[in-house]
Image (cartoon, grey):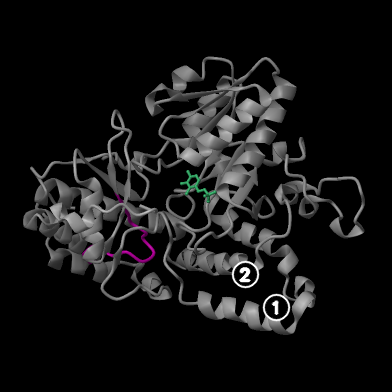
Amino acid sequence: MMNLTPTLQDCELLDQQDPLRSLRSQFDLPPGVIYLDGNSLGVLPKATPARVAQAVTQEWGTDLIKSWNSAGWFTLPQRVGDKIARVIGAQAGEVVAADSTSINLYKVLSAALHIAAADQPHKKTIVSERSNFPTDLYIAEALCKERGYTLKLVEAEDIATALQGDVAVLMLTHVNYRTGAMHDMQAVTAQAHAQGALTVWDLAHSAGAVPVDLHAAQADFAVGCGYKYLNGGPGAPAFVWVNPRHTERFWQPLAGWWGHATPFEFTPDYRPAPGITRYQCGTQPILSLTALDCGLDTLLAADRLGGMAALRQKSLALTGLFMQLVRTRLHGQGFGIATPALESQRGSQVSLTRAEGAYTIVQALIARGVIGDFRAGDGGQHPDILRFGFTPLYIGYADVWNAAEQLCQVMASGEWQDARFAQKHAVT
Ligand SMILES: *Cc1c(COP(=O)(O)O)cnc(C)c1O
């Protein structure tokens, strides 16, 4: 991008030349909306309503219980998992789509602690990042209480130092949900392994957003979210991956019948299924899995256009453009940029900071059809955040320009100070 501030015409030209432009037509984007929250809830794919309706009326309504076999319901978690594997550098048969991110994190963290305890019983610490997503920290805190471990929270720059202690597991989210800062998974995993610690990676803001190669990184465990960049719909099932070197070393704590080797023999004792299937617990939500399957197809449609590498290139161009527009057009308006300028350290979102008004500015933007979100700070080192996600499947360059233009207008008009934008909703 040139140093001159790009114009709307420049951005429209970039859209015309965008080799991924056709992917946008897979989605039902509401008119008049610039949706910069695909990092929180991905957009509805056009194919999803009819496919889910078919699963309801035909598979459930007509075929009823036969559909566990005839419609392949029983193997859907594995089949969706195989599609997810393709965007996270895993092999077919190594991923299942199941349960929620929080629950899957409990499973893998528990398994990691069992393996660490067997190999190096003196290690009693889990290290994570203080600004990790809270549910990840809560799950770790609960497990630490249950098992007599200590959860040590550090800033990103202090992880290497923290690993020098007796660390059993390093649990990190690859792309930080607040700032969009991305860890070097391969380097951090190598650092952890050099200190004898196992790694648990949360890919909630990575899967479908940035290229991930779990095998190249030699990661140990990973979980991730279905309703963000995978476009699976509200509450979509999450996913879980375990490095094959660990999969069969421990059951997993929620040893339910769907993780049993032979669930339909109904034996009273548990025998874990081989491979990742043991990471299922009970009956999975087939309708939601069906919607997630459609969401993944929108992502895999990029394969013929260069796949995740091409999506990454566009995503970096979009986030780079937004940051450039903020720096030039909103100079002196009190905004900071929490997202790294360095491309290798950036996910697919841009987070702005502002000492006051972050919440009301987001609300004023939403009223204008520019949908981002707000994440509260802690009043100290971590400030309030205005978050903007740029999903390259359906966001274009002119969208970025128009979003920045709306932000300029919200600030210039002073409308963000309007009392009607100050009312806090339950979900921000
Ligand atoms: C979105 C997200 C979650 C969500 O967890 P749920 O169990 O789906 O509520 C967890 N961790 C991270 C890092 C996330 O970004």
The foreground one among 217 and 105 is 105
User: Is residue 180 among the parts visible in the rendering?
Assistant: yes
Above or below, 94 against 200 in this view is below
Instruction: Provide the residue designation for mark 1.
Output: 60
- Expressed as whole percent of the image width and height from the top left, the position of residue 423 reads 27, 54
Q: Residue at x 41, y 73 (%)?
A: 27
Q: Quadrant of residue 396?
A: bottom left
Circle 1/circle 2 CB separation < 8 Å:
yes
Q: Nearer the viewer, residue 290 or 5?
A: 290
Label 1: which secondary element: helix
Describe residue 228's horizontal placement relative to residue 276 as left or right: left
Q: Nearer the viewer, residue 30 or 224?
A: 30
On screen, residue 379 versus residue 118, left or right, reads left
User: Left or right of 2: which side holds 185?
Assistant: right
Asked whether residue 321 appears in the rendered view, the answer is no
> Which residue was labeled with disc 2?
287
State the extent of the magenta-drawn residues as a range: 387-398
Cα distance between the residues tagged 1 and 2? 10 Å
Compared with 9, 93 (above or below) is above
Circle 2 Cα neighbour tier, 10 Å, few/some/many (<14 / 14–19 / ≥20): some
Image position, residue 187 (x, y; %):
47, 31
Residue 284 image position (x, y, % from top left): 68, 60
